[in-house]
Structures are given as C-alpha cells and as structure tokens.
Amino acid sequence: MAFGTREITLHPFGKGNLTAAGSQYSTEVTNTTTTYTAVQTATIDLPGLDKILEIEFGITTAIKTATAQTTLLKVQASDDAVTWVDLCSAASTTGKTTYVDVTRSGRFDVTTAGFLGKGQGKKSPFYLRMVSAKSSTASATLTSKAKNSSYLHVVYTGF
C-alpha cells in the first residue's frame, strides 16, 4: 500500500434542528456548577490513518445564562474519551440572557504530550469536544449548544 499525505475537513457538531433563522445547533446542555460539562463530543475516525501531522479546529458554541455572569469555554481532545487534553486555554465571556455565539479556533500541535498516545498521533478514532462551565458558584444556570458551522481539519499520512 502506498502512503501519502491526506487532508480531511469534518463538520461533526450541531446536528440538531434548524432554527427559524437557518442556523443549526446541537441539543442544549445545562450546567449549574463550576465543573466543566461537555457541550457536544465528536468521534473522529480517519480512514487509513498512519500518523496525524496537524489538527485545526474552529468550534462555535452558543451560550446563555439566567443572569450576567462569566462563563468559561475550552476545546479538548482525547484518544480514549476518558483522559482529555486542553487544545486551548479557557476563554471567558460574559453570559447574557439570550444566546451569544462564542468561537474557539486554532491549530493544535499533535506532538504535545498526553494527546493521542503521548504525541505519537497514530490513534483512530479520537475524540474532540467543547466544554463549558460557570466561573462562579452563583445560582444562575449556564445553557450551551454547539453550532453546525464548527469544523475540524486534519492533515495526516495514510493509505
């Protein structure tokens, strides 16, 4: 079998019903604690994977809170859906009583220790998720949902 560099762009998030404005989101997830909760998790299975070279992501989450309070969002990846590695630091934003879209994007160095078998980049499937949390123990509920325009672009060697 011949190996070569392959690229794939996936849109694994926000597979819910269309809104009246034409946007599409995942099911709402509520959180009443300061513990991070998964908004949506995607399983990424790459055909013919030999080694992942680069991962680029752009994930948009709509958030709202019952009162204006700071919320935290970050993107995580895992090779076993148990141990998660942060792909970016937590972004803080002030929640509003109506949904506000917040995007986290960037490229992730797969040689980072702890991701995909300690940087080997040879595990498929792997998992990607956006997580949200409240930054304080205030009583307001945080509601989040992933938008369908979110994407994942992977460059890898394979056959």
Image (spheres, grey):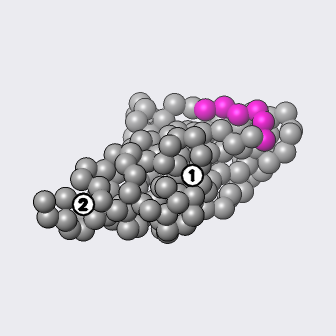
The spot of residue 15 in percent (x, y) is 40, 36
The spot of residue 117 in percent (x, y) is 49, 55
| Residue at numbered disc 1 | 76
Rendered position, 88 above or below 65? below
> What stretch of residues is rendered in magenta?
29-34
Q: Would residue 60 be seen by someone viewing this image from the given angle?
A: no
Q: Quadrant of the C terminus?
A: bottom left
Q: Disc number at residue 103?
A: none
Q: Quadrant of the N terminus?
A: bottom left
3D distance between C-alphas at marks 1 and 2: 24 Å
Identify the residue shown where x is 34% and y is 62%: 51
The spot of residue 54 in percent (x, y) is 40, 67
In front of the other: 155 or 27: 155
The spot of residue 109 in percent (x, y) is 49, 69
Q: Residues within 10 Å of mark 1 (few under 14, many from 20)?
A: some
Rendered position, 113 above or below 100? below
| Residue at numbered disc 2 | 158
Residue at the far left in the pictured view? 1
Q: Would residue 77 be seen by someone viewing this image from the given angle?
A: yes
Which is more N-terminal, label 2 or label 1? 1
Q: Residues within 10 Å of mark 2 (few under 14, many from 20)?
A: some
Label 1: element kind: strand
- For the residue marked with disc 1, what is the amino acid? Gln
Identify the residue shown where x is 24% and y is 60%: 158
